[in-house]
Image (cartoon, rainbow, N blue to C red):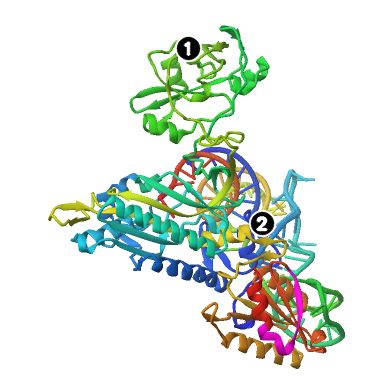
RNA sequence: CGGGGCGUAGCGCAGUUUGGUAGCGCGCACGGUUCGGGACCGUGAAGUCGGAGGUUCAAAUCCUCUCGCCCCGACCA
């Protein structure tokens, strides 16, 4: 392919409103353009990369017996009403009416439709198991699109769905997907972790996320390098660091106008870890007092698992239930309340509000001065250790590039996806669903693989394998060599990669500097530089993008040397 | 949805405080000189100053409304 025949609008400057590296580079290198908030156009180079990724996805999905199909993205509301998600999902779903006034929506994901087909067409245990997948557009009216192609309102997803006769079948398909995902991300050249995750709106019993660590990531994951525990902070547990709190008399102290942990700790010259933080929340069953150590934050999802959905209490509610201003709440003397306390305050001596304006109480001990249900309700923080092996934990930012869910019967039940077993009994199908975002893979790869000059693609998903750079297109010899190499490399079938090289030739009448800069920016793995200077000695130059190392090779050995350097390079 | 920021030539920006001829750099077109890491000289095209309304002799600039984009948070298969 010739550069002059491809639309590659590179730019020297970065648009001012980008923040993420992947966003800046994919724009500058001419891979994508933004249409509106959360809507991106994939230009020729970007689309080539996505197709490379999709090719890998298809190969690995076929390997585990998944069958590619294609579903509509416009859905009738009824099916989503049957599973309840029409109601439980709020503004995030794009909804519309057709000309007859029928409610429709744009698919955020395809559990409903896949299950609908399964319910209609699969009847016998003999029809199962099935794995169906597609690479299809999803639409979500995101509250806040961000990070360029990281979080968009319209995006392509590889989503697959498994249908099994029993839990053991689901376990096998879940495991197969996990293994396929490992191969996929490895082939794409990503550093990634498989972490425990929250099932979120998908529901279901078990789920894992695949996370590519990068500072641009929206999620935070907790990693134990020692025993391998890895989890999204949404579900992560840890061992709290001991507070080293010291003994204090049990007495009220005057703390005029000091309300926050920070204010009171400074006022009393104590560390935040000496405090017992009391938070009043309103659950459906009534008010609940949540207690945790002053240096920790309440983990709302963990608390919700124990007391159900809740919201923070308003100032009036705090006055009503506790008869005290916010800032002076404490656990002492509230035996009538449901109190849920974090183990970080189970041993030791603490300071907390006195339930009396402008007073706190020192010397509080659990069980002696208050009683509580004990549950881990705190967020993991730096310095915590692993709850299984007590080694130190790492907290890293990461991009979610894939996930796998054990759905069980969450969708087969409402949509009546049933089969007859060997005894002729009707049984619910056991389902799993599994997603990967190809654009997020591309973004994560850029985030993990770039330098000051631009993108460094791994060979597996680069838009081209080789870029030929004839430095002076006005020189006849240069062009003769370049054209010849271009044709040869594009034509020779290579048994290793099972295809011929995809070659981009920069045939623009540009100065060498411009071509070098653009080549580095675009990030094709191997550059073949043809200049008059080298040709005098029948030499051309091979330069690998990642290392920037260049070797001069004789012209008559060009093709074999290119093979060699290409396959030796990382 | 809450908080903040920004909309001026294709891109990056100045000009807005204090109303008075719409500018700079890059890019683009043409001519010339250059040609191994984003060249130089010259000439030129290109703007409803996001939009609507208002104040004023006069609005990019002041006021009101509105639309869009970005960031932080809330939210998030």
Between residue A386 and residue A26, name the one nearer to us.
A386
Residue A549: % across, % down: 75, 71
- The subunit carrying tag 2 is A
Tell me if A220 is positioned left or right of A337 in this view: right
Residue A271: % across, % down: 64, 21
Q: Secondary structure at mark 2?
A: loop
Query: Looking at the rendering, which quadrant does residue A197 occupy?
Result: top left
Q: Quadrant of the C terminus of chain A?
A: bottom right
- Magenta span covers which residues? A548-560
Query: Looking at the rendering, which quadrant does residue A506 occupy?
Result: bottom right
Between residue A107 and residue A368, name the one nearer to us.
A368
The mark closer to the camera, 1 or 2, is 1
**Residue A62 vertical placement versus B14 (above, below):** below
Residue A46 belongs to magenta span = no
The tag on residue A97 is none
- The subunit carrying tag 1 is A
Residue A556 belongs to magenta span = yes
Query: Looking at the rendering, which quadrant does residue A565 occupy?
Result: bottom right
Residue B24: % across, % down: 79, 64
Between residue A25 and residue B19, name the one nearer to us.
A25
Tell me if A543 is positioned left or right of A156 in this view: right
**Residue A218 vertical placement versus A115 (above, below):** above
Q: Are marks 1 and 2 on the same chain?
A: yes
The tag on residue A332 is 1
Q: Which residue is mark 2?
A: A16
Residue A41: % across, % down: 52, 67
């Amino acid at each position: 392919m010739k550069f002059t025949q491809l639309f590659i609008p590179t730019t020297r400057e970065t648009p001012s409103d980008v923040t993420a590296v992947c966003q800046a580079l994919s724009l500058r290198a001419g891979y994508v353009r933004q249409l509106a908030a959360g809507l991106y156009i994939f230009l020729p180079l970007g689309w080539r990369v996505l197709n490379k990724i999709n090719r890998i996805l298809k190969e690995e999905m076929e390997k585990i017996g998944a069958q590619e199909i294609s579903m509509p993205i416009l859905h009738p509301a009824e099916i989503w009403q049957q599973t309840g998600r029409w109601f439980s999902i709020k503004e995030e779903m794009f909804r519309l009416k057709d000309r007859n006034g029928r409610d429709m929506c744009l698919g955020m994901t395809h559990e409903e439709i896949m299950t609908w087909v399964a319910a209609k067409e699969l009847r016998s245990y003999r029809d199962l198991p099935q794995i169906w997948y597609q690479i299809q557009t999803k639409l979500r009216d995101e509250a806040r699109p961000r990070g360029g192609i990281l979080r968009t309102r319209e995006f392509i997803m590889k989503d697959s769905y498994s249908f099994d006769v029993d839990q053991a079948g689901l376990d096998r398909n879940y495991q197969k997907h996990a293994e396929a995902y490992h191969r996929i991300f490895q082939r794409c050249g990503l550093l990634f972790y498989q972490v425990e995750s929250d099932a979120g709106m998908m529901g279901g019993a078990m789920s894992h996320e695949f996370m590519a660590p990068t500072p641009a990531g929206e999620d935070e994951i907790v990693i134990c390098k020692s025993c391998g525990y890895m989890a999204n902070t949404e579900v992560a547990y840890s061992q709290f660091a001991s507070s080293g709190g010291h003994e204090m008399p049990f007495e009220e102290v005057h703390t005029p106008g000091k309300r926050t942990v920070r204010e009171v700790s400074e006022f009393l010259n104590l560390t935040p870890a000496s405090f017992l933080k009391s938070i009043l929340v309103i659950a459906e069953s009534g008010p609940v007092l949540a207690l945790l150590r002053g240096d920790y934050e309440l983990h709302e999802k963990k608390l919700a698992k124990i007391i159900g959905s809740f919201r923070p209490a308003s100032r009036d509610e705090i006055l009503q239930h506790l008869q005290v201003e916010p800032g002076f709440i404490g656990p002492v003397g509230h035996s009538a309340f449901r109190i849920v306390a974090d183990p970080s305050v189970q041993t030791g001596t603490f300071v907390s509000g006195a339930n009396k304006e402008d007073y706190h109480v020192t010397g509080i001990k659990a069980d002696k001065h208050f009683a509580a249900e004990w549950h881990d309700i705190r967020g993991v923080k730096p310095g915590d250790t692993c709850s299984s092996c007590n080694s130190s934990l790492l907290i890293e930012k990461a991009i979610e590039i894939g996930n796998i869910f054990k759905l069980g019967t969450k969708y087969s039940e409402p949509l009546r996806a049933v089969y007859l077993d060997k005894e002729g009994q009707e049984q619910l199908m056991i389902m799993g669903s599994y997603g990967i975002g190809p654009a997020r893979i591309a973004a994560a790869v850029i985030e993990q693989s770039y330098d000051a000059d631009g993108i460094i693609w791994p060979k597996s998903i680069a838009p081209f394998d080789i870029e030929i750079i004839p430095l002076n297109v006005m020189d006849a010899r240069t062009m003769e060599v370049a054209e010849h190499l271009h044709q040869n490399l594009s034509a020779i079938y290579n048994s290793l990669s099972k295809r011929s090289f995809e070659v981009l030739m920069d045939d623009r009448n540009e100065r060498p500097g411009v071509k070098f800069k653009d080549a580095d920016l675009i990030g094709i793995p191997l550059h073949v530089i043809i200049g008059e200077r080298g040709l005098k000695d029948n030499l051309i130059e091979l330069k690998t993008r990642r290392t920037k190392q260049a070797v001069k090779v004789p012209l008559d050995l060009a093709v074999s040397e290119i093979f060699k350097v290409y396959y030796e390079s990382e």
